[in-house]
Image (cartoon, rainbow, N blue to C red):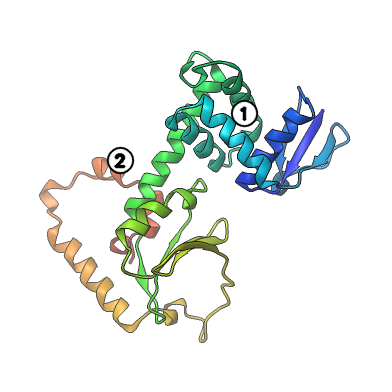
Amino acid sequence: MTILIYDNTWPGFLTAIFDAYERKLEQARICPQRTLQPSLLYTPINIITDNVKAKRVWLGLEKKLSRTGLQNVYHSFLSELPAIEDHLLEYIRLALTLDGAEKAYGNSTILRGTQVAKMVYREKHRMEAFVRFQLTKDGIYYGAVDPDFNVLPILISHFEKRYADQKWLIYDLRRKYGIFYDLEKVQEIELDFAKPEGGDIRSIFSEEEEIYQTLWKDYFIHVNIKERRNIKLHLRHVPKRYWKYLIEKSP
């Protein structure tokens, strides 16, 4: 068994797909560097990311898949689920071989790809709703997230349009990178979270931020009608795992 080892990036993954075809590897697997477990049972091949190769693969997929099908491939990749690369390799093989393969839901590979993509899309939608920004002393609105899937790349368009008049940073605490908008463009960044002076994280935020948060909490208290409270319905729309993002849910 041959395993193609790539650098965990989307262009790197597409390059691995290209190399699997170029080398005529029928039984290949694709594995990101971060999850590689050394073994004597496979032959490793390190893939060097090549944007030209990656683009050729994507252009090939554009000829075979609809916009929804292309999104399914990309969103499934962002899921970071175990062995998702192997699944997508098979999905892409089917897409490049059979016309209309993306709608062949009777095929377990196609069905799984669609299901995973929907899971990622739901997480994206929830992040759009639940991100709460806090104003820092530098005039940047900062929001920390910890999504199940790597959805930051597909959040850019929503926040760039909605908050085009202010600087903001959404940081993924689990994956240790963020997307930063500087009023002109969005770029990916990494931060060194050194403990602030005094050891209190609140020291990095604007003095007005605590006032705004208090007002926001008071607003939710006053609009809450106890007699109409439906905890079961509330948890369905706002699962507890998202409460950590919500200012109105903090003590």
Which residue occupies 55% across, 61% down? Answer: 177
Q: Quadrant of the N terminus?
A: top right
Q: Residue furthest right?
A: 40
CB within 8 Å, label 2 to label 1: no
Front one among 135 and 221: 135
Tell me where residue 214 appears, x and y as whole percent.
25, 73
216 is higher (above) or lower (below) than 223: below
Amino acid of disc 2: Arg
Front one among 47 and 143: 47
Crowding near pointer 2: few (<14 within 10 Å), some, many (20+)?
few
Q: Is residue 110 left or right of residue 206?
A: right
Q: Label 2 vs label 1: CA separation? A: 30 Å
Tell me where residue 250 appears, x and y as whole percent.
34, 64
233 is higher (above) or lower (below) than 189: above
Q: Is residue 212 left or right of residue 185?
A: left
Residue 27 falls in image quadrant: top right
Which residue occupies 76% across, 22% down? Answer: 26
Instruction: Looking at the image, tell me whether mark 2 or mark 1 is earlier in sequence order.
Output: 1
Residue 57 falls in image quadrant: top right
Tell me where residue 235 appears, x and y as whole percent.
30, 44
Crowding near pointer 1: few (<14 within 10 Å), some, many (20+)?
many
**Residue 208 seen in the current view:** yes
Instruction: Give the residue pinned by disc 1.
Output: 87
Amino acid of disc 1: His
Which residue occupies 25% across, 74% down? Answer: 212
> What mark, if any, has residue 236 been given in the picture?
2
Q: Secondary structure at mark 2?
A: helix
Front one among 125 and 99: 99
Q: Quadrant of the C terminus?
A: bottom left
Q: Secondary structure at mark 1?
A: helix
Tell me where residue 123 appears, x and y as whole percent.
42, 44
Front one among 111 and 63: 63
